[in-house]
């Protein structure tokens, strides 16, 4: 601010008092100085482009010709030698100073166990700049000059650093950098566990709390159009914040949003990056969802509501509009960088581009060919998502710090890592070790999409199936999802079908070092809805009853409580529908009982009772598990803890049948009566229990 005032006064003195220029011109000059200074100071680097263009246009078309006219034609060159010399000096001094567009991380925390800090400095020709600091307790360990002239990496040793404003001198230019106190020790950050139930939602599709952020001119061209399932719909963090009570009413305890980082790719061929899996800035929330501060405020309020927050991250790839693509920091920043530009050097996926095979098996296959491994690990997900090379240690350090920065800055309670096995396993293991060391009680779940337990288990921390230890605490149980979906329309009495599939899948839990740290689900944003295009709530209740009682971390997908259905055959958007009532022009509000149909209310109440009963229930979070081979079409699972038992009884047949209680005496014992946890009514355990077709019964005693 003082420099802006000084500049303005200087120009005024020179032009008005000494050179006798017209007052209008002098006022325009001062306004221009203030405008350009503010655009640099208060507009984030990523938003500068349109404003910079505007200021440059004013400069080129109005101010500069006016200046020439006044100085050279009206007042004479010699008479105004002073103004010309002041002008030249200021232009030269502006050009001489190195220009810093961005430093990442944007700020950092003192007192981390890992005392090294990588600063990625981005600015025109900054590569050869000299960097020093005399900030107490900070030493420059090394400076890495990358291939691009516009990047410079500085590694600082922060072992003795105190919180405060560190000044870096970059070629003499003073750059301020905030070092902050940590709010908690790493040990105090507790991740989500099997005592939680995660509720996954897509921020763009859940609820919009503001219409002002729907269509932003500061972003690359896109359309917000709710009638198009592939475009943005306008949902945002404020919309989620307004429904925190709803999550409490439902009874979930953690929220997992699909990614909320900036995705500034333009719409292409009628589709957009509303899903968030093409990040273009690793340190900024997409402004269509809100600001970093909004995310922090939402997290704080969620915590007050007893809800944990799980952040979706993507280390395998970024979006094509990430600045790294147009100006690659180093020539091995991405895998297959030769695909990045066309013959003229313009950024575009060229004809050499090769899509990944989407096959994750090669990374575990003892007979894998090189080409298959290459296509899994190094080929790109889609042409608009270049594949990051985590084997470059600077890339990896950047990503490690980024995940820690979000934990420290926002206070997130867990991470869901997208496309986990598509990134290099050894590098991801290094990332997990860094997280586990800094935050020993934290949790991270990796997406491991192969439907065999032996595959999924191989990715869990401390497994004995692979030589390398992934150090990943939680894996996603695609086998459970797969078997559950297959069982939906089948009868258990058919050999090897129906609920037998679930029984058989859980048999392989011996492969997991920690089965209760496996995340299970029956649907997510990448799958068909469990209901498909149908409305079979009996099968859905069986799936949910099991999901919420076996020793897993259960994850629900938004809208299951109001029977949202759909398949991907009609496109991804069909399984990512807007939550009715989340948007201002919705005809009904399914967040309220009045806005729901009878069938939706029935499902909501059933699920809500189950979820509230599950909260804090140690039989579910700590109990042993016993399962019985489906008998007469009935699948029975028991959970037991400190003399208490929960019995889950699923009739897998379309017929009325009876449960022969005596067969289950090892888990029923002397008990003659139990309580149905949904209706609260008594259940007689001393004689056969009659079950309706596809009935789900959860009894505790
Ligand atoms: Ca909005
Ligand atoms: Ca990869």
Image (cartoon, helix red, strand yellow):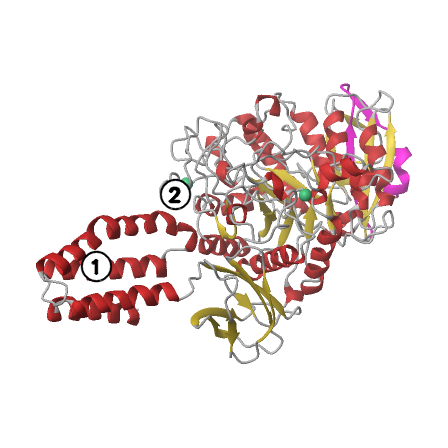
Q: Please, is residue 227 above or below residue 26 in the view?
A: above
Please state, as top left, top right, bottom left or bottom right, where the C terminus lies in the image: top right
Q: Please, is residue 51 above or below residue 227 in the view?
A: below
Q: Quadrant of ligand 1?
A: top left
CB contact under 8 Å: marks 2 and 1: no
- Residue 590 is situated, as x and y percent measured from the top left of the image, at 49, 33
The yes-or-no answer for disc 2 within 8 Å of ligand 1 is: yes
Residue in view at x 19 percent, y 60 percent: 29
In the image, which residues are magenta? 643-669
> Residue beneath label 2, please?
213
The question of residue 653 being in magenta is answered with: yes
Foreground: 71 or 108?
Answer: 71
> Residue beneath label 1, please?
31
How crowded is the residue under tag 1: few (<14 C-alpha within 10 Å), some, or many (20+)? few
- Residue 99 is situated, as x and y percent measured from the top left of the image, at 42, 62
Earlier-in-chain disc, 2 versus 1: 1
Q: Quadrant of residue 570?
A: top right
What separation in Å lies between label 2 and label 1 (alpha carbons)? Answer: 29 Å
Q: Please, is residue 179 above or below residue 571 in the view?
A: below
**Side (left or right) of 68 relative to 449:** left
Query: Can residue 448 be spotted in the picture?
Result: no
Query: Can residue 9 be spotted in the picture?
Result: yes
How crowded is the residue under tag 2: few (<14 C-alpha within 10 Å), some, or many (20+)? some
- Residue 547 is situated, as x and y percent measured from the top left of the image, at 72, 38
The question of residue 476 being in magenta is answered with: no
**Side (left or right) of 187 relative to 372:** left
């Amino acid at each position: 601010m003082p420099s802006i005032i000084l500049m303005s006064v200087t120009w005024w003195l020179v032009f008005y008092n000494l050179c006798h220029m017209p007052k209008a011109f002098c006022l325009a000059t001062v306004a221009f100085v203030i405008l350009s200074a503010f655009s640099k100071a208060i507009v984030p680097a990523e938003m500068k482009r349109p404003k910079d263009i505007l200021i440059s246009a004013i400069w080129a078309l109005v101010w500069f010709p006016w200046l020439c006219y006044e100085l050279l034609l009206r007042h004479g060159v010699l008479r105004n030698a002073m103004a010309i010399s002041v002008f030249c000096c200021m232009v030269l001094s502006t050009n001489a100073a190195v220009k810093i567009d961005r430093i990442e991380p944007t700020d950092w925390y003192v007192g981390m166990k890992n005392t090294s800090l990588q600063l990625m400095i981005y600015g025109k020709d900054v590569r050869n700049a000299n960097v020093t600091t005399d900030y107490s307790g900070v030493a420059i360990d090394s400076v890495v000059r990358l291939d691009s002239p516009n990047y410079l990496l500085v590694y600082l040793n922060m072992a003795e650093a105190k919180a405060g404003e560190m000044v870096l001198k970059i070629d003499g230019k003073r750059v301020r950098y905030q070092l902050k106190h940590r709010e908690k020790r790493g040990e105090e950050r507790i991740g989500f566990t099997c005592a939680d139930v995660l509720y996954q939602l897509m921020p763009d599709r859940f609820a919009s709390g503001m219409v002002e952020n729907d269509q932003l001119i500061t972003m690359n061209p896109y359309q917000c159009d709710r009638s198009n399932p592939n475009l943005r719909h306008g949902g945002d963090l404020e919309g989620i914040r307004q429904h925190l009570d709803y999550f409490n009413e439902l009874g979930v305890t953690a929220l997992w949003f699909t990614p909320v980082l900036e995705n500034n790719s333009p719409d292409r061929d009628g589709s957009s990056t509303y899903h968030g899996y093409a990040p273009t800035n690793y340190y900024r929330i997409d402004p269509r969802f809100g600001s970093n501060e909004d995310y922090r405020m939402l997290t704080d309020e969620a915590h007050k509501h007893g809800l944990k927050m799980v952040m979706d991250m993507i280390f395998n790839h970024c979006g094509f509009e990430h600045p790294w693509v147009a100006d690659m920091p180093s020539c091995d920043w991405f895998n297959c960088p030769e695909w990045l530009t066309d013959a003229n050097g313009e950024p575009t996926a060229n004809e050499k581009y090769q899509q990944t095979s989407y096959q994750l098996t090669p990374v575990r296959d003892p007979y894998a060919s090189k080409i298959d491994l290459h296509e899994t690990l190094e080929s790109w997900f889609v042409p608009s998502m270049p594949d990051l090379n985590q084997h470059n240690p600077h890339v990896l350090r950047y990503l490690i710090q980024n995940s820690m920065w979000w934990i420290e800055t926002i206070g997130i309670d867990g991470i869901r890592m997208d496309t986990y096995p598509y990134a290099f396993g050894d590098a991801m293991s290094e990332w997990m070790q860094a997280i586990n060391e800094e935050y020993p009680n934290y949790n991270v779940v990796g997406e491991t999409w192969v439907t065999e337990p032996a595959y999924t288990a191989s990715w869990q921390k401390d497994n004995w199936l692979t030589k390398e230890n992934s150090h990943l605490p939680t894996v996603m149980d695609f086998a459970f999802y797969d078997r559950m979906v297959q069982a939906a329309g089948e009868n258990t009495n058919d050999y090897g079908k129906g609920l037998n599939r679930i029984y058989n899948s859980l048999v392989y839990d011996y492969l997991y070092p920690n089965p209760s740290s496996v995340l299970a689900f029956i649907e997510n944003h990448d799958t068909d809805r469990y209901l498909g295009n149908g409305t079979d709530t009996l099968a859905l209740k069986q799936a949910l009853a099991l999901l919420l009682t076996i020793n897993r971390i259960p994850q629900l997908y938004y809208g299951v409580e109001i029977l949202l259905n759909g398949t991907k055959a009609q496109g991804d958007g069909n399984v990512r529908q807007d939550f009715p009532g989340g948007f201002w022009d919705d005809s009904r509000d399914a967040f309220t009982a009045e806005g729901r149909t009878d069938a939706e209310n029935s499902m909501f109440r059933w699920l809500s009772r189950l979820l509230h009963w599950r909260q804090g229930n140690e039989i579910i979070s700590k109990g042993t598990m016993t399962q019985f081979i489906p008998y007469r079409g009935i699948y029975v699972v028991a959970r037991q803890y400190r003399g208490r038992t929960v019995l889950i009884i699923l009739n897998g047949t379309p017929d009325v049948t009876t449960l022969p209680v005596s067969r289950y005496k090892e888990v029923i014992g002397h008990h003659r009566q139990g309580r149905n946890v949904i209706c609260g009514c008594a259940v007689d355990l001393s004689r056969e229990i009659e079950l309706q077709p596809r009935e789900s019964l959860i009894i505790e005693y």
